[in-house]
Amino acid sequence: MNSTSTPPIVLAAQSNTIEAAKGYAALGMSVIPLKGKRPALTSWTQYQQSRASQAEIEAWHRQGILQNIGIVCGAVSNNLVVLDLDGVAGYPAFAASFPHLAETYTVATGSGVGAHVYFRVEQMPPSVKAMTTPIGNLELCGEGRQVVAPPSVHPDTGQPYRVERAHDILQVPDLDELVRWIEAFKPRETQSTWKPPTRMNFPTGETTINPRVLDAIAHDLLRQDFRQHGDWLHGRCIHPERHKNGDRNPSFGFNIRSGYGHCYVCGTMLAKEVCETLNIDPDQFGGLVERPEPPVIQVSAKRELLPEKPKDPPPPAPTDHLNEAALPDWLAQYMDWAGTTGNQTPMIFHQAAGLWLLATAVGRRLYGEAPWGVKIYPNLYLMLVAGTTFYRKSTAYKLAEQLARQAIPHMLMPTPGSPERFQEALAGRMPSNFDKLAREQQERLTKAQPYAAQRGLLKDEVAGLFGAINKRDYMTGMKDLLMELYDCPDYFDKDTQTGLNIVENAALSILGVTTPASLSCAVSTGDWDNGLLIRFALLSPEPNYAERPPAKQYRSVPQALIEDLKALHDRLPAPQQSETGMKAPGSLRLNVQCWQQVQSYGDWLRRMCDPGRDTELDDRLKGVYGRMHVQAFKLASLFAALDWLKTSDDVPTVTVEHWQAGQALAEGWRQSAHRLLEQLDRSGEAVQEKRHQDRLLNAIRQTGATGVALRDLYRNLNFSAKQARQLAQDLVRAGLIEERRMDRAEWFIAVEHVSEHA
């Protein structure tokens, strides 16, 4: 086919990136720059209404953000509609069903198993899709959608999008039959036939249930794809374990006016039960029952009425803290990769690991100058807490470590063995065996030296660190050190046996994992009061956790994630050469547009800690609440830094949109802390495990300096050998006992008797 007979769309698709983008625009299509498959712009809404000019496209190219090309569907591109077929059977099935529609410009996607089929229509169809059908994913992209266009490269496979059928774009009156074809693949909507229960033993009118609690329940159910029918929300039963074969035909309804739920199998449910099942704490919203207004009391004219106590302000707007639409592209892509690779790990853990990576890459090189007189750096202390085995929590930090070692290995800090050695590492002092290390390790440590106090720390069993801090004499001072590091001091020093350690420009970020039982065993009430524990974001599995399908094959870390994390690290201020060597890098002051929102959120959190509230907040959570607005701002700063990579601005700007995304995640963390306390206090598995640990620990302590064999322990306590060994190892990691070998037998001694034994 010569160039004179080749359709213009094909000529554009076969050009290089910049020429292809300009060619598409010349053909009346709205183009946007993509990074991978996602828009590289902070917002691309305007290009759904008007097309970018040639000058704008050239500017994107000069800025380096035109890596891939997206074409916006809909009226802005002269009524362009694209059928997206993802799966090897999708296109053959389409072509067999609609041979007359197959004679159009078609693109083979970079995934190797998909196709984009282009149309121009007189009457725009709705954007419809049917996912996970027998022939793959089907989506008709119209208004508000964009598709990746040639010669873009797929971010995962590295393969280009290419022309599959070199036709011109087919013009048709409508695509009604294609819409019906896609709709036919959708599962039948059983909800449409559902009707509220006709025989009810509860009222359906107004009730005294706190309307804010009802709103919280409704929001949670709607997030689970419940459908609304008048005053009822309908979906699958919240107690699927009570259904013999599962709740195949959704049977549960919740009345948003009365606060009662009803299942045709389980029967009537009170709002209290619904809250408990959904992990909603009514106390966060002022209690389950709305107390009636007190009657007006007639008083003499000489006596003044006391002012009415103000009600709690409404909480921040409910937001799905795991909603990727609110997250920057990099974090969303990281969660996609990590969530697929670690399919048995809660997504909130993968999200936290991605945020820790960003905080580690930034270090101390960005800060916000808060109106209340402090500098806020984006470092984070994160603790992933979940039961052992079922939740693969360690996978989250292992995947993050894998990415960090490929992108920014010098920003990882060695695990502290003692406060003195930890301070030496923070001060940038080389290990005593530096000369004996491999050259690659020496280079990494040398590169890390200027960043010594602003790196990332990974701790597999973080409860063990707390246990050691509380029980080991040689760890005295570690607690104060960790608390001080969180607040990013400019300078502190300490004279030790090895000399004076001077730590400058600190901003440590920690990612640790543990179990509720280990945490309960290792920490004391004082750890909540003295401020160390509350500096951590206490993350527990999301309430709607569901295991995702396993990956069909292993996917290594996407190169785009590595390159972007490295680019973020490299764009920030670099270390400076001085007379004494490389000096720690400087910091950029963020341009902040959301301090008012930060302070408003802080004020709301403070009022929730008011001891005069009808239901007082747990004292352990008050410290968590006191730092939540700062944590939200740290997250907003990281999001702003990612968007900054797409611009030529001198410093990142933290917008209200960044703040809203950060606050949404912080709200998820706040709810997570409530869930964790509930589990520490009342959850069956965690409490039972803690009881077993206490029994084992007391039995070991009673043996004094002689200690006791594992075999004697499990026989005397009626544990299985496996159970006793697991409990003992938890206590070892918590720093409460030490393991010995006596005539090849496993032997344990309480730490308070170790010196006596020695």
Image: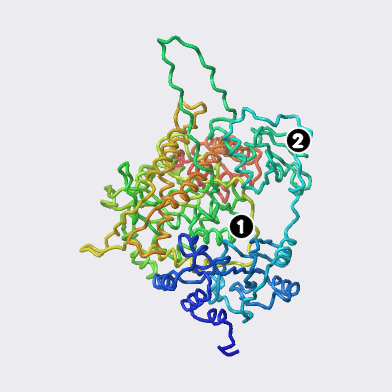
Residue 608 in the image: x percent, y percent? Answer: 46, 33
Left or right of 112 on screen, residue 575: left
Looking at the picture, tell me which residue is in the foreground, 501 or 721: 501
Q: Residue furthest bottom?
A: 2
* Labelled pair 1, 2 in contact (Cβ < 8 Å): no
- Give the quarter of the figure containing the N terminus: bottom right
- Give the quarter of the figure containing the C terminus: top left
What residue lies at 60% left-to-right and 79% top-to-bottom?
163
Whether residue 695 is visible, yes or no, is yes
Whether 654 is drawn above or below 177: the answer is: above
Looking at the picture, tell me which residue is in the foreground, 100 or 419: 100
Residue 372 in the image: x percent, y percent? Answer: 32, 41
What residue lies at 65% left-to-right and 63% top-to-bottom?
125
Q: Residues within 10 Å of mark 2 (few under 14, many from 20)?
A: few
Looking at the picture, tell me which residue is in the foreground, 312 or 140: 140
Which numbered circle lies on residue 267? 2
What residue lies at 56% left-to-right and 44% top-to-bottom?
728
Whether residue 425 is visible, yes or no, is no
Number of labels in the image equals: 2
Which numbered circle lies on residue 343? 1
Q: Residue furthest left?
A: 579
Secondary structure found at label 2: strand
Name the amino acid, label 2.
Answer: Gly
Secondary structure found at label 1: loop
Left or right of 426 on screen, residue 534: right
